[in-house]
Image (cartoon, grey):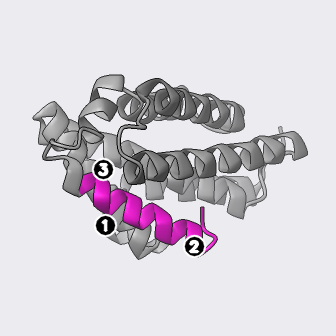
């Protein structure tokens, strides 16, 4: 394979940004509304697992994946087929956001199997999208994030109207609504 400084620069950028998955890097790639949603997802994970280290790891993995996919997009690394997968992923993520909001707004409509299936489908599409671009370690991060948030027990607690998670769900859905209105999701 021929040497390419552009490829080398992209690999370095992915590696550096991956190692710096902190608040300042998040702000570089992720808007304020998305950052607020991530903060609420962290709180949900922390309360659900009772483990702040695990909750931080899930969010850090999520940020690393978002940053790496953003770098790949920026450098036009995806084939036409992969771009179709990305479009399908975006549609499924939009459907998931709309479903999450609907379940929140209309009491007693929550169906953990539906939400879990949407998130599992998103995971599978993301893995397919990055299959040729990211390492098995990154694939593990994708699995970690999506498996965590598609957990039926976590989803059930999140949507329990009497649960302390209700305030987190309100903030998450408010953020999702804003992203949809702005055309970002």
The magenta segment is 168-185
Q: Residues within 10 Å of mark 1 (few under 14, many from 20)?
A: few
Instruction: State which tag comes first along the sequence, 3 or 1.
Output: 1
Would residue 173 be counted in the magenta stretch? yes
Residue 87 appears anywhere in the view: yes
Would residue 182 be counted in the magenta stretch? yes
Residue 156's mark? none
Q: What secondary structure do most residues of the magenta stretch adopt? A: helix
User: Of circles 2 and 1, which is in front?
Assistant: 2
Dot 3: element = helix
Residue that mark 2 sits on:
181
Residue 41's mark? 3
Image check: 112 left or right of 11?
left
Foreground residue, 162 or 168? Answer: 162
Q: Residues within 10 Å of mark 3 (few under 14, many from 20)?
A: many
User: Of circles 2 and 3, which is in front?
Assistant: 2
Alpha carbon separation for disc pair 2 and 1: 25 Å
Alpha carbon separation for disc pair 3 and 1: 15 Å
Q: Are marks 2 and 1 in contact (CB under 8 Å)?
A: no
């Amino acid at each position: 394979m021929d040497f390419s400084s552009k490829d080398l620069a992209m690999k370095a950028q992915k590696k550096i940004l991956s190692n710096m998955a902190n608040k300042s890097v998040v702000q570089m790639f992720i808007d304020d509304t998305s950052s607020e949603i991530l903060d609420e997802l962290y709180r949900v994970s922390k309360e659900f697992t009772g483990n702040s280290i695990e909750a931080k790891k899930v969010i850090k993995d999520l940020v690393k994946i978002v940053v790496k996919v953003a770098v790949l997009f920026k450098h036009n690394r995806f084939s036409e087929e992969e771009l179709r997968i990305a479009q399908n992923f975006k549609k499924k993520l939009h459907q998931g956001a709309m479903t999450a909001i609907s379940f929140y707004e209309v009491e007693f409509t929550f169906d953990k199997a539906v939400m879990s299936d949407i998130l599992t489908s998103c995971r599978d599409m993301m893995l397919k999208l990055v299959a040729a671009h990211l390492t098995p370690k990154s694939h593990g991060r994708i699995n970690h994030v999506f498996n965590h948030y598609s957990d039926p027990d976590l989803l059930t607690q999140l949507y329990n109207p009497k649960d302390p998670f209700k305030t987190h769900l309100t903030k998450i859905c408010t953020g999702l609504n804003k992203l949809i209105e702005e055309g970002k999701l």
